[in-house]
Amino acid sequence: MVLAAMTHSETNFLKFAIDSEVLRFGEFTLKSGRVSPYFFDAGLFNTGRQIATLGHFYAALLAEREPKPFMLYGPAYKGIPLATATAAALSQQHHLDVAFAFNRKEAKDHGEGGEVIGAPLRGRVVIIDDVITAGLSVEESVRIIRAAGAEPAAVAIALDREEKMNTSEHSAVAEVETQFDLPVHVIAHFSTLVSYLGNESDLARYVPAMTAYQSRYGAKLRADSTDR
C-alpha cells in the first residue's frame, strides 16, 4: 500500500478527531458486516468547542473548493449540526454569509409544514454530511434539492473510507461522483490516516491492522476522481 502525502489541514483534522475520541481504533462490526479496525462517528463531536472546530474544517474546505456562490443542505440527522456549524464558520472565518437548510425525517402537515427547514433551497446547493456509505442519503438529498428547483452542486464529507462497496469495486464516494455527476469534497482520507498513524509513535501499532483491512476492502481508485 502506498502511503499518502498529508496536507496540514488533514493532519490537524485527524489529530482533532482522535483527541476527541470520535476516531477510535479496535474492532468494530459495521452495518455491512465487515469487521473494521477503526470507527469514525461524527455524532460524538458533541460539545460546543468540538462542533465549532469541526465547522471550521468544513468551512476551510468549501472556501477553497467552491469559488461560486452556494448554500448548504444538511440531511437529517447528522447533517443538521454540520450545516449549522459550517455556515457559522464560513461567516466568521471567511466572511461568507451562506444560507443553510435541512430536512425533517417526516414532513409536517401543520404549522410551517413541509419537508425542509431553514432557507429556501435555491441556486447551487452543497450537501454536507459526515461520511458516504451506501449513497442513500445523497440520493434522497438530491431528490429534495431538485424538487425545490435548486441545483445539487457538490457533497462535502469529513472522511472518505476509500473502501469498495459490496456491489462495486469502487468506493461509495466514487459511485456518488459518477451516479450524480457531483464532486465530493473530503477533509481527510483513509490513506492519509494510515500515513498519520505511522508517523505517531503511540499510534503506529494500529497500522498493520489498517493496511490489512485496506488490502482486503480497499476500493479501486478512479483516475478522474475530483478530490485526489
Image (cartoon, rainbow, N blue to C red):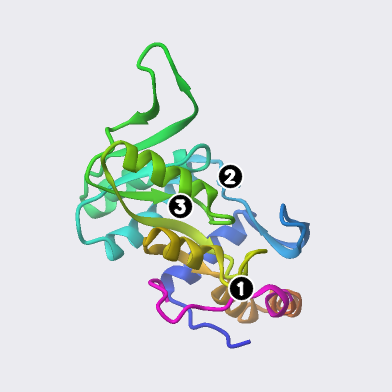
Name the front one of labels 3 and 1.
1
Region in magenta: 213-228
Relative height, residue 24 to residue 117 (above, below): below
Q: Quadrant of the C terminus?
A: bottom left
Q: Quadrant of the N terminus?
A: bottom right
CA–CA distance between discs 1 and 2?
28 Å
Residue 54 badge: 3
Q: Earlier in the sequence, mark 1 or mark 2?
A: 2
Relative height, residue 15 to residue 154 (above, below): below
- Residue highlighted by disc 2: 43
User: In x, y percent, where is residue 23?
Assistant: 63, 59
SS for dot 1: loop
Residue 200 lies left or right of residue 74; in this view the side is right
Viewer can see residue 186? no
Tell me the quarter of the picture where residue 65 sits. Answer: bottom left
SS for dot 2: helix
Q: Is residue 91 magenta?
A: no
Q: Earlier in the sequence, mark 3 or mark 2?
A: 2
